[in-house]
Amino acid sequence: MILLTRRATFSASHFYWNPAWTQERNEAVFGKCANRNSHGHNYTLEVTVTGAIDPVTGFVVDLKWLKDLMELKVLSVYDHRHLNHEVPEFANTIPTTENIAIAIWNRLEAPVAAAGTSKLSRIRVYETSDIFAEYRGEAAE
Amino acid sequence: MKAYFTRAYTLSASHRLHSDSLTAEQNRSTYGKCNNPFGHGHNYRIEVTVGGQVDPQTGMVINMATLDGVVRTQVLERFDHMNLNHDPLFANRVSTTENLTMAIFDLLATQLKPAILDTIRIEETENNFFEYSGKH
């Protein structure tokens, strides 16, 4: 099995807040991430696909196609946006790095599969160089 | 849904690669400059990956503050600015980064519930790294 990864970056703002909780509880659980004035990150996104190598081109997928798909489905929606206020999947879901990884998986899984040459293997989202979340399409245990 | 969360930590420690079951000559030929008698040190970069259900209340696999606290008490306070060879865990095993990776996995494995420790990855230098995901 061969894995192919394409990296991209986007910059976005967010805050962590559970509306079912009091302000005190939000601040206790989320710390400074609960500041309603928001903060932001330069996120790094890694999209990994797997598939057979085309014997003619030697490619699993055309990287330009993958770049364009990431731009269309993710970056054009997330980049320089406020995730809580401007990205629909975070209207009722806290935009933690874990949930961002799952949301990006959900945006890319079907169009990658539809292209027919590969399938999505892993989404990794770096919030900083020392923190990242990963989703491999696994359901809960 | 199951996701994985990774956080990196650094610690600085010294060690010397030396096996009591080898002769002085064998130690030198096996470990090279890592066997120099007074030891040497590294800035280790430790990546701790936990896996688990994303809590619908918090959107998190594990609260990073909880993870930070466990890693601090179990790992950083134990090893940072220490000589690894003097730690009881390395009394009978060589302080290679393979063994350090497995030792740190075992120190953290039971401490993170309900999240599950998935992998420990340690960079000894930017060109050498080691990874352990427990006994399979």
Image (tube, helix red, strand yellow):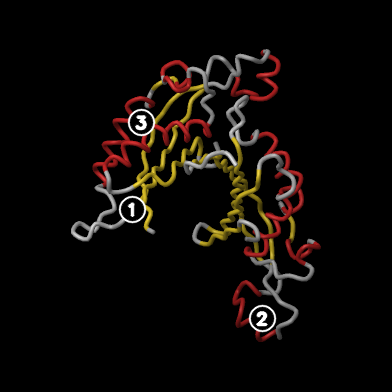
- Seen at 66% across and 41% down, the residue is B115
Question: Which label's residue is closer to the chain start, 3 or 1?
Answer: 1
Q: Secondary structure at mark 3?
A: helix
Q: Chain of mark 1?
A: A
- Seen at 67% across and 13% down, the residue is A23
Viewer-proximal residue, A117 or B13?
A117
- Are tags 2 and 1 found on a single chain? no
Query: Disc 3 designates what residue?
Result: A74
Within 10 Å of disc 1 (Cα), the crowding (few <14, some 14-19, many 20+) is some
Mark 1 residue type? Gly
- Are tags 3 and 1 found on a single chain? yes
Quadrant assignment for the N terminus of chain A: bottom left
Circle number at residue B27: 2
Query: Disc 1 designates what residue?
Result: A51
Q: Position of residue A25 (x, y in %)?
A: 70, 18
Mark 2 residue type? Asn
Q: Secondary structure at mark 1?
A: strand
Q: Position of residue A112 (x, y in %)?
A: 32, 41
